[in-house]
Amino acid sequence: MQLIPHLNFKGNCEEAFKLYAQSLRGKIQTLMTFGDSPMADQVPSDWGGKIIHATLIVGSAQLMGSDAPPERYERPKGMTVTLQLDDPAEAERIFRELSESGTVTMPIQQTFWAARFGMLVDRFGIPWMINCGGEAA
């Protein structure tokens, strides 16, 4: 069994997944539009370029996502995508890239449990926690 997070976006899934692939050093495996799917004739013409299914591979992990129709989109609540890293410099780089044009809710810093920890909501509305393991120095 695998546990795979799936994120919904407000029409900007492709842009988000391209940022995530760059920031997380991952590879987009799937980026299928509604227009390229068997549902092409069931969506408004301006929706054909939106993403029905995206998969990002990062190491042995996967992240999936799609664009939600405007009437069904809800901003994420009660969840956070958490990244666990071992390298403080890498944690800071990822935090910086994901927080660009987003909102930092806790600056990345040393804590009593980690060498680096920070929280943000990216420009797509997705909440993230970046945790860099190890003892705090």
Image (cartoon, rainbow, N blue to C red):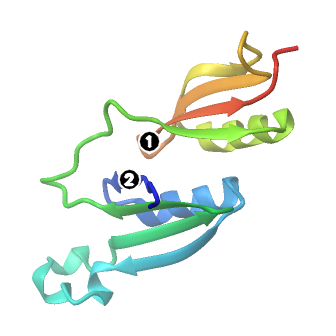
The residue lying toward the viewer, choosing from 3 and 94, is 3
Q: Residue at x 38, y 56 (%)?
A: 6
| First in residue order: circle 1 vs circle 2 | 2
Which quadrant of the figure contains the C terminus?
top right
Q: Amino acid at mark 1?
A: Ile
SS at mark 1 in the image: loop
Which quadrant would residue 10 be assigned to in this image? bottom left
**Residue 51 place in picture, x, y as percent:** 35, 71
Q: Nearer the viewer, mark 1 or mark 2?
A: 2
Tag shown at residue 7: 2
Residue 113, relative to residue 103: is it above or below? above
Residue 78, relative to residue 100: is it above or below? above
* Pointer 1 with pointer 2, Cβ within 8 A: yes
Q: Residue at x 32, y 72 (%)?
A: 50
**Residue 32 place in picture, x, y as percent:** 39, 80
Q: Which residue is mark 1?
A: 126
SS at mark 2 in the image: strand
Tag shown at residue 72: none
Q: CA distance from mark 1 to mark 2?
A: 8 Å
Relative horizontal placement of residue 123, taking residue 47 as reference (left or right) = right
Q: Amino acid at mark 2?
A: Leu
In this view, which residue lies farthest toward the right? 137
For label 2, count other residues whose C-alpha is less than 10 Å away and answer few (under 14), some (14-19) or many (20+).
some
Relative horizontal placement of residue 49, taking residue 112 as reference (left or right) = left
**Residue 4 place in picture, x, y as percent:** 44, 56
Number of callouts in the render? 2
In this view, which residue lies farthest toward the front? 1
Q: Residue at x 61, y 43 (%)?
A: 98
**Residue 114 place in picture, x, y as percent:** 74, 20
Which quadrant of the figure contains the N terminus?
bottom left
For label 1, count other residues whose C-alpha is less than 10 Å away and answer few (under 14), some (14-19) or many (20+).
many
